[in-house]
Amino acid sequence: MKKLFYIFLFLIVFVAFFIYTFPATAVVSYFFNKYNVGYKSIQGNILELKIDGINYQNFKIEHVILKPSFTNINIFLDKNNYLQIDFNKNIKIKMKKIRLEDFQIKPLVAGTFSGDLNIKLEKYILAEGKSSIFLEEIKPVGFRNIQTKLKFSENKDKTDVVAKINSQDINGTFNGYARIPVSNFYAGEIVGNFNGKLFGSKSNQKIKIKIGRFLKSLGI
């Protein structure tokens, strides 16, 4: 009985030692450096990592907490806004009115984003769920105060998208799909039809957006 107790005690000590000595900060730092992601500091251990000052091109995250488990990694922006990534490349996003300009070094788009989404990373990015985006300003194109409510559903190798758009100049519904390769996000496209009013006139037209070209116009 005493021998069993010592074995049990040894296992507890070993696990505790492993957790607190595992070089989690070095591992994250290695991947950030590999993909040219900047950061100010990484602190913590395998149970919880606190990362400050993440930046990549025009994107930034001031503060984020990573909490790994046996099946997934939880990424918290704060207690109400988080991403959950499991080891099958599934991502769950829960966001409520986060400020878009808070994540840009040089703010080009101002507004809020809310979403409850499940995303699969297979050959293509596939999404299920809903989101809401309020764009107060898009500086490169001059649009203001656009409210968009979106619904996403998986459809084989693409994601079907229904978007209801309301603003002073644009009112209508977009029905289409997004096909975005996991291997190259910038090669993705959004295709569909817009039906409604554009600057006071009725509009029914086909839409085709090349994601890489669109992001480049925003300086991303």
Image (cartoon, helix red, strand yellow):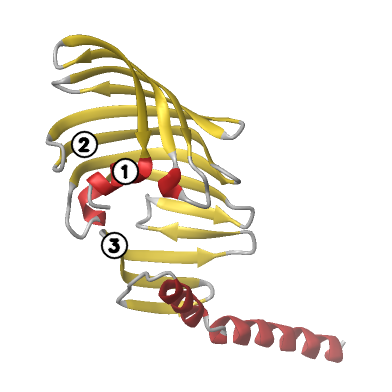
Foreground of the two, 94 or 6: 94
User: In which image quadrant can residue 123 be found?
Assistant: top right
Foreground: 193 or 187? Answer: 187
Residue 158: % across, % down = 54, 33
- The vertical placement of 91 against 54, above or below, is above
Horizontal placement of 95 versus 87: left or right?
Answer: left
The residue beneath circle 2 is 135
Labelled disc at residue 54? none
Residue shown at 38% from the left, 50% from the top: 81
Q: Nearer the viewer, mark 3 or mark 2?
A: 3
Ranked by sequence position, the earlier of labels 1 and 3 is 3
The residues bearing labels 3 and 2 have C-alpha atoms spaced at a distance of 21 Å
CA distance for labels 1 and 3: 16 Å
Q: Percent from the top left, x then y, of residue 14?
A: 68, 87
Provide the residue designation for mark 1. Answer: 213
| Residue type pointed to by label 3 | Gln
Screen quadrant of the N terminus: bottom right
- Residue 216, image x and y in percent? 27, 48
Judge whether residue 99 can be spotted in this image: no
Give me the disc on residue 57.
Answer: 3
What SS does tag 1 mark? helix
Decide: is 160 above or below 135: above
